[in-house]
Amino acid sequence: MSLGTEFVGGVAEGPVPFFTQARTFERLWPEISGRICDVFDNGKFSHGEQVGELETALAEYTGARRVVGVNSGTDALVLLLRALGVRSGDEVVVPAYSFIATATAVVLAGGTPVFADIDPATYALDPDEIARVATPRTRFVMPAHLFCRMADVDGINEVARDLALTVVEDSAEAIGMRHGGVHAGLHGAGGVLSFFPTKTLGALGDAGAVLTDDDHVADAVAALRHHGRVGRTLNDFPAISTETAMAGTNSKMDDIQAAILLAKLRHLDDDIARRAALAERYRAGLDGVVPLPDPGDAPVFYVQLIEVELRDALAEHLAERGIGTEVYYPAPLHLQPCFAAHGHRRGDFPRAETASARALALPLHADLEPEQVDGVCATIREFYAGRP
Ligand SMILES: *Cc1c(COP(=O)(O)O)cnc(C)c1O
């Protein structure tokens, strides 16, 4: 069977879209289509051979002892927390500024998120804030690594030891990020990856994975993603299970997504280097115009953030000129309506609130050309010219 080697997808509209992977797919289409053909030939479209191969390849890339593929980064967080034994009444300290799933995953796993403020230098959970919000019911702490650098995992681990908390990492954005040679997600009990299309390693739909060095945790996640079934290898499970040990869910990964990710993973380090060069160009182009956040020692640019006055007016100015931006993240988590019962108010976590009000993400992806970055920088300079 053949799908042909010509790429038939569309090319994104507009001069500088916030995100597109049309050209990446065009470039990699021979590899991707070959792998997709393997899926058709193999005939198993969910939880099959390509998923197993991807898990092995990701274990090699990250250095994790075990990688378990699931349906999304959100499911990876929920199943990881469940596998670690989060129970009703357990509190999990989370940053007040992150993607909403960092906090909602805790609720879906049966726990209670407890918010803490961020360190404005990393945009991640501030280790010094954990003890301020922890109570005798607090059992876990879950930092999120955002944009281009990791949370202060050493500081967080130290506090966690003192308070006897288990560290879980929301490393959904952090593929390729390492601290002390150890990949994000492997500094505590486990972490996750998201392969949502816009992520540094993006699929053509939803997919995610759990990373852990703990076999018990990995086995539990592998069972939970598949209706709680145990004792089955990926390629050998019967249609009807007689060994359901716990109430699981259906969070299997699609093999078509796994095939796409396997093809793209081989080029991930090139993409990361390309993103770094583009980020460097932003830094040069915006020098003296807007301050760029300090990227730290070993950045991996998932997002190029700027923090600015007049954020919304700038976004509009860029949009009118065909330049896409995104607000990461528009409301701090403690002020989201779904957490109204926590009774938080504006002012409770001022640094998270400031980031939400001022942060703007600029286009940064493997399809972006250096000249497009120059254009974005020129448009930002034009916006600020003549303003105090
Ligand atoms: C993307 C993301 C998630 C969720 O991943 P999905 O695959 O979209 O479910 C969770 N946390 C953070 C910080 C993310 O950026």
Image (cartoon, helix red, strand yellow):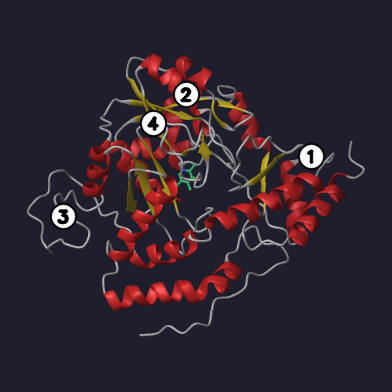
Rounded to the nearest angstrom, the CA distance separating label 1 from label 2 is: 30 Å
At label 1, counting other C-alpha atoms closer than 10 Å, the crowd grade (few under 14, some 14-19, many 20 or more) is: some
The yes-or-no answer for disc 4 within 8 Å of ligand 1 is: no
Residue 290 - label: 1
Q: Picture quarter containing residue 215?
A: top left
Helix, strand or loop at disc 3?
loop
Q: Callout 1: helix, strand or loop?
A: loop
Judging depth in this view, the residue of 122 and 278 nearest the camera is 278
Q: Earlier in the sequence, mark 2 or mark 3?
A: 2
The amino acid type, in three-letter code, at marker 3 is: Arg
Q: Position of residue 223 (x, y in %)?
A: 21, 48
Of the numbered discs 1 and 2, the one sitting upstream in the chain is 2
Q: Which residue in the structure is indicated by mark 2?
A: 156
Q: Which residue is mark 4?
A: 188
Along the horizontal axis of the image, is 362 left or right of 33? right
Residue where numbered disc 3 is placed: 232
Amino acid type at circle 4 is Gly
Say what amino acid the circle numbered 2 marks: Ile
Tag 4's secondary structure? Answer: loop
